[in-house]
């Protein structure tokens, strides 16, 4: 009788052990599903926290109009909320090679263009077509091979191409620097929003959009202080 009880007890322990294993597997699976669903939200929240602490990193490019420089950092604040924005591509992944535009088309996971893909890259999230067009016009040092020209996407050149583009009054049919000096940041953001939709007035606002005028004013003070040193 004792042997039977011991055998029954051992069998019960085995059954309970396997039940526990199955339960752990189920809980692990549920946890992985929840983590995958929340990963993007956690990542975004972390980026916003970092941005609130550090602001928009300084430009690599030296010199230039402090008003335009502050605007560039404001665009970056909304478009590439990362500690090292020059190397980031759409989706938040990083690349190592900036000898040219990365031209990696990443699937858009939300918003009005969900399901399509985007080649947005770098601090100002240049599309490959936009970069090719603007670099051909504003890049200060293209490299040439026979009849072809290559345009380095290194941080300094991302800055300089955008700076020269924003300074070009013909391109925008407005003097952006003058508008900024007149404290018309809202007008400037509205004008630029078809190019960078996260600046507001478009179809893809994000959590940072509403703060951009205040962000610009803060960054402008930083740039004005730097320009006086």
Image (cartoon, grey):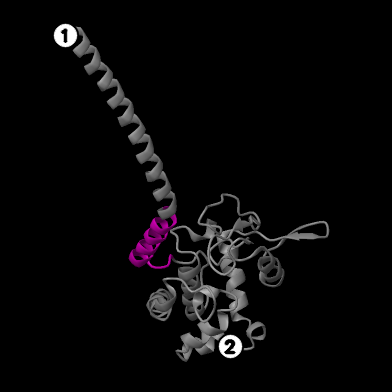
Name the residue that disc number 2 marks. Answer: 175
- Other residues around mark 2 within 10 Å, as few (<14) / some (14–19) / many (≥20): some
Q: Identify the image quadrant of residue 130.
A: bottom right
Q: Is residue 41 left or right of residue 3?
A: right
Badge 2 vs badge 1, beta-carbon distance below 8 Å: no
x and y percentages locating residue 206 in the rendered image:
46, 71
Q: Nearer the viewer, residue 179 or 61?
A: 179
Q: Nearer the viewer, residue 70 or 125?
A: 125
Q: Nearer the viewer, residue 17 or 9?
A: 9
x and y percentages locating residue 64 in the rendered image:
53, 75
Identify the residue at horizontal 30%, vertical 31% (top origin).
20
> Can you say whether 102 is above or below 184 in the image?
above
Q: Secondary structure at mark 1?
A: helix
Q: Is residue 76 visible?
A: yes
Q: Nearer the viewer, residue 226 or 46?
A: 46
Given the current orientation, which residue lies at the most extreme right position?
147
Q: Identify the image quadrant of residue 115.
A: bottom right
Q: Identify the image quadrant of residue 164.
A: bottom right
- Other residues around mark 1 within 10 Å, as few (<14) / some (14–19) / many (≥20): few
Name the residue that disc number 1 marks. Answer: 2
Identify the residue at horizontal 59%, vertical 80% (top origin).
167
x and y percentages locating residue 149 in the rendered image:
76, 61
Q: Is residue 68 magenta?
A: no
Mark 2 or mark 1: name the one nearer the start of the chain.
1
> Can you say whether 52 is above or below 26 in the image?
below
Q: Residues under labels 2 and 1: Cα distance?
A: 96 Å
* Residue range highlighted in magenta: 39-57
Identify the residue at horizontal 55%, vertical 85% (top origin).
176
Q: Is residue 55 magenta?
A: yes
Q: Secondary structure at mark 2?
A: loop
């Amino acid at each position: 009788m004792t042997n039977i009880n011991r055998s029954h007890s051992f069998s019960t322990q085995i059954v309970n052990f396997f039940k526990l294993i199955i339960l752990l597997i189920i809980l692990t699976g549920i946890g992985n599903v929840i983590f995958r669903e929340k990963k993007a939200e956690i990542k975004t929240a972390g980026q916003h926290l970092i941005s609130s602490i550090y602001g928009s990193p300084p430009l690599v490019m030296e010199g230039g109009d402090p008003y335009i420089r502050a605007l560039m950092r404001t665009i970056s604040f909304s478009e590439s909320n990362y500690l090292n924005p020059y190397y980031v591509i759409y989706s938040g992944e990083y690349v190592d090679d900036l000898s040219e535009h990365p031209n990696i088309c990443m699937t858009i996971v939300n918003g009005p263009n969900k399901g399509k893909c985007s080649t947005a890259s770098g601090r100002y999230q240049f599309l490959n077509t936009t970069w090719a067009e603007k670099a051909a016009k504003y890049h200060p040092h293209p490299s040439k091979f026979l009849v072809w020209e290559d345009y380095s996407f290194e941080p300094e050149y991302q800055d300089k191409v955008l700076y020269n583009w924003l300074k070009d009054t013909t391109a925008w049919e407005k003097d952006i620097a003058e508008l900024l000096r007149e404290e018309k940041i809202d007008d400037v953001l509205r004008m630029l929003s078809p190019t960078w939709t996260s600046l507001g007035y478009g179809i893809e606002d994000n959590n940072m959009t509403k703060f951009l005028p205040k962000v610009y004013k803060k960054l402008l003070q930083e740039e004005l202080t730097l320009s006086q040193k």
